[in-house]
Image (tube, rainbow, N blue to C red):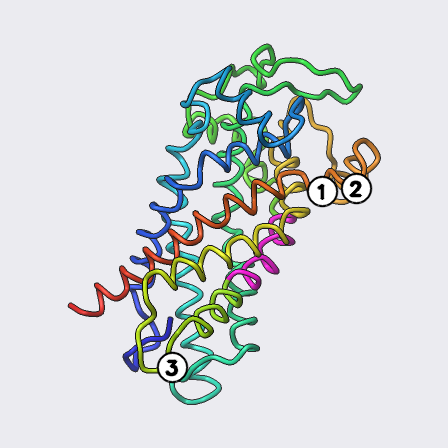
Amino acid sequence: MQSSKRNCFRLDDFIAGWIGGASSVVVGHPLDTVKTRLQAGKGYRNMLHCVISIYRKETVAGFFKGMSFPLASITVYNSLVFGFFSNTQRLISKHRYGDGRHPCGMLDLTVASMLTGFVSVGLGAPVDLVKIRLQMQTQTVLTANGTNIPLRSVELQGHGLYRGPIHCISSILQTEGVQGLYRGAGAMILRDVPGYTLYFIPYTIFCDLLKPDNMSSLHPCSIWLAGGLAGSISWVTATPADVVKSRMQADAQLQRKYRGILHCIIHSYRAEGLQVFFRGASVNAIRGFPMSSTMFLTYELSLRFFRSL
């Protein structure tokens, strides 16, 4: 993902990231819904049981619940992630080696990845929060005294069910304020800073291994494979922090259970044991491959197109 020009800042990285983000949302959202239900919902024995339950109760449409908002917002989010990462690489190379085209070393990639993970939370936390609240609307709420009550019977501080992403945002702002949109942001930092490091670095390593020589362009199939493997690695290792983030973001104001990250970890461990932090790991591994392979392939091919003009 190095630039062929001397200018450090490239706008086409952001545009290619936007296109890649849109394609990855369409591919990955159904399994993202399953992952969220497994991590923050109740009553599912395993991934297959969750899939069957969603289909029986909500038909195919249930897997795409809350997708309109991610499709509109995650495209912007991925544009930020890939644009920031690529431009940061070039900035580091120019600062360290005097040339933005100089290949980044492993330390450079690590710094760029970690900075990308940290910056991404600013936009990613509200996006994930709204997506999860919409995905969880058919679930039961576990009250502080351990009683399960259907979410449809709960009045959200004077509001009924969220009618859509805009109504969801409005309701959160009214009941929880601006800080409510960033609930779970701390857990998201714990997920995304190491998560993006284990996303971009494996991708770079796999691309280097699959490239026939330094002068050749990587074959689309190799990009697809490298991106998919990197996505699976990243999502599986990020699962414990992702579980905490999902639980905190699904924790609505009216039935608030978790006072913070540490309380969520302790409460979840005492109630469900260590295995709770690996809930949804299999879904993450499966979902991570097609989402990331589509993301990287679309991103790289879009860049080739833009830079051939």
- Which residue lies under the disc numbered 2? 274
Front residue of 304/260: it is 304
- Which residue lies under the disc numbered 3? 100
Q: Which span is picked out in magenta?
A: 186-199
Q: CA distance from mark 2 to mark 3?
A: 45 Å
- SS at mark 1 in the image: helix
Q: Position of residue 111 (x, y in %)?
A: 55, 71
124 versus 173 height, above or below? below
Please, what is the three-letter code of the amino acid marked with disc 1?
A: Phe
- Label count reads 3
Q: Answer few, some or many: residues within 10 Å of disc 2's Cα (few below 14, many 20 plus, some between 14 and 19).
A: few
Which residue lies most toward the front here? 212
42 versus 241 height, above or below? above
Q: CA distance from mark 1 to mark 2?
A: 6 Å
Q: Position of residue 294 (x, y in %)?
A: 38, 51
Queried whether the magenta region covers residue 190, the answer comes back as yes
